[in-house]
Amino acid sequence: MSTLDKSASQSHPRLAALALGAIGVVYGDIGTSPLYTLQTTLSHDGMRPTPASIFGVLSLIFWAQIIVVSLKYMVFIMRADNKGEGGIMALMALAQRCVREQPRLRWVLLTLGIFGAALFYGDGVITPAITTLGAVEGVKVAAPGMAHWVVPVTVAVLLLLFAMQRYGTARVGRIFGPVMVLWFVAIAVFGVRMIVRNPEVLWALDPWYGVRFFHTHGLQAFISLGGVVLALTGAEALYADMGHFGKRPIRLAWFGFVLPALVLNYFGQGAMLLEHPAAVDNPFFKIVPHALLYPMIGLATAAAVIASQAVISGAFSMTREAMSLGYSMRMPVVHTSREMSGQVFVPWVNSFLLVMVLLAVVGFRSSDSLSAAYGIAVTGTMAITTLLALVVARRQWHWNGVVVVLVGAVLLTIDLSFFGANLIKVDHGGWFPLVLGLGVFVLMTTWRRGRELVVRGIRQGGLALAPFIENISEHPPLRVPGTAVFLTANQASVPHSLLHNLKHNKVLHERNVLLTVEVLDTPMADATEHLRVESLGGEFYRLELRFGFAEDPNVPLSLSQCARAGLPFDMMDTTFFLSRETVVADKRRPGMALWRDKLFVFMARNALPATAFFQIPGNRLIELGAQVEI
């Protein structure tokens, strides 16, 4: 066997393993959408499961999955990777990098990206609620008298799910793939069973049925798009998890396994409705043989938990990225795996999601009622992703402008049609993710703007560094042994902590390092750009450390690597100095609105200290206070 053949044969097991992992982690959300999609679409707003509506809706679902998932996400969006990483935060950073010379456009892209990320938290709330409710609602088919237990059982499952988050997904994740494979096989088999009985349902593969559905049903057909889009929920996860599995395994799993299983199940439900229109109250479980109902309810609940886990983990990862990029206050982050740095647990986010999910379950009480809320969160993020990707296509891939306009017109027409159909249902639950997303958007933008004002205030009150060093050389103070590291956001001015130390302690260390930590708009910093050292004379040094937004900024570990740049550190002889800013809202100063100033002050007081975020040991740290007005 040649070397090429050997390497190729070795790659097949690896590819299969990654594809299996993708089935378990990536496709949980979109894989559980058959639980509620057809039921919601064919029973809302006066819709009736007539042959014309069944064929029309099935055709729309099939072609939506082909155009949106297969072509838009698999072929177009997944090409826009940020050094292998995906997701709306990574895409926003990539798009901003493409328009560095246009500050106004950068601001627009920043606003879009943050709002899309905020809507993702709405998805993180509604996905666990709707999928778990949809799974447990199978009890209504198996034993109608137990319908009143649906909400309590759902709440119990969700409490257990969120309680398990602190232990990480490493152990549970090993069974995700096999469970979801069993799920897709089961839904495909049950779908085929019904298609064999009514094979004429396969005519709905013809897109003409979708076109005719719009012609005959008018506004009602447009409104039905709010239900059709539920078949696409989880498409954003395909892109967000690209960095964990790679493009090829995700594409292989979709085209070779997941898409066929979903199509067979949807068309199987349609075949059932052609025969028994009254089954529209829960067509998913009514195509399951009665003897297998309880096992299928259990499998559906497991699949719902897996789908929820993927979205919750995504919310943790996105929060960590937002903290690194400066769009979120610093929070404690717990690493739950020694092998995978991306597996993290954010306690504050976990508690927030749990409260919101339970409110959604208790408030809406059924997957049918939650469907309107679900659609707005999903379609809003999808439209923003399209806009950001079009910027990348034009500026980085250098696509022809006409091609970009044509592609954008097609994709945005679809995205905005779905969004508009859901917007009609704002008063039926669509307000929930909008309010939630708007709240998160306000928090993220307030934190970002507040930090800019704090940095501006520090810089305005700082002394120029170069004259200060010259003055120190001419009038040297008492020097003490060791190295002092002063964390500063402005390398051109003297850190407040250095001035306070010199003023109150009347001493200066033998070696003084001005340290700035910068987070790049790429997931990982290259080895050549990770650190830069500059000698300023008089044993003063400027040190810049750079981290990618998907990395953990470990300052002590990075300092141990500075010896190669000519600046060795003995950590036992090194002291860190930091100015602990006390932020005060002052209505006399031009900044944000006073209520946003006060909100930022509250967030700043409750944020994780920068020293903990940068993993600086407390026994080597001295904090000196400074008051900053915004």
Image (tube, helix red, strand yellow):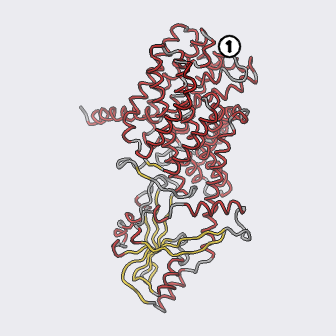
Residue at point 72%, 26% (across, down):
222
Location of the N terminus by quadrant is: top left
Q: Quadrant of the C terminus?
A: bottom right
Task: Give the residue at the far left of this rendering.
Answer: 1
Place of residue 459 in the rendered image (x, y in percent of width and height, measured from the top left): 60, 73
Q: Position of residue 454 (x, y in %)?
A: 61, 68
x 37%, y 63%: residue: 557
Per the image, the residue denoted by label 1 is 52
Residue 559: horizontal and vertical position, in percent?
A: 38, 67
The answer to which of 135 and 588 lies nearer the viewer is: 135
Q: Quadrant of residue 248?
A: top left
Amino acid of disc 1: Ala
Please indicate whether residue 573 sits to the left or right of residue 516 in the image.
left
Q: Residues within 10 Å of mark 1 (few under 14, many from 20)?
A: some
As drawn, which residue projects farthest toward the bottom? Answer: 475
Q: Secondary structure at mark 1?
A: helix
Rendered view: 472 above or below 448: below
Residue 34 seen in the current view: no
The residue lying at 48 percent from left, 20 percent from top is 187
Position of 514 with respect to 215 (left or right) is left
Please say whether residue 550 is visible from this viewpoint: yes
Q: Nearer the viewer, residue 109 or 20?
A: 20
Q: Can you say whether 183 is above or below 563 in the image? A: above
Displayed quadrant of residue 362:
top right
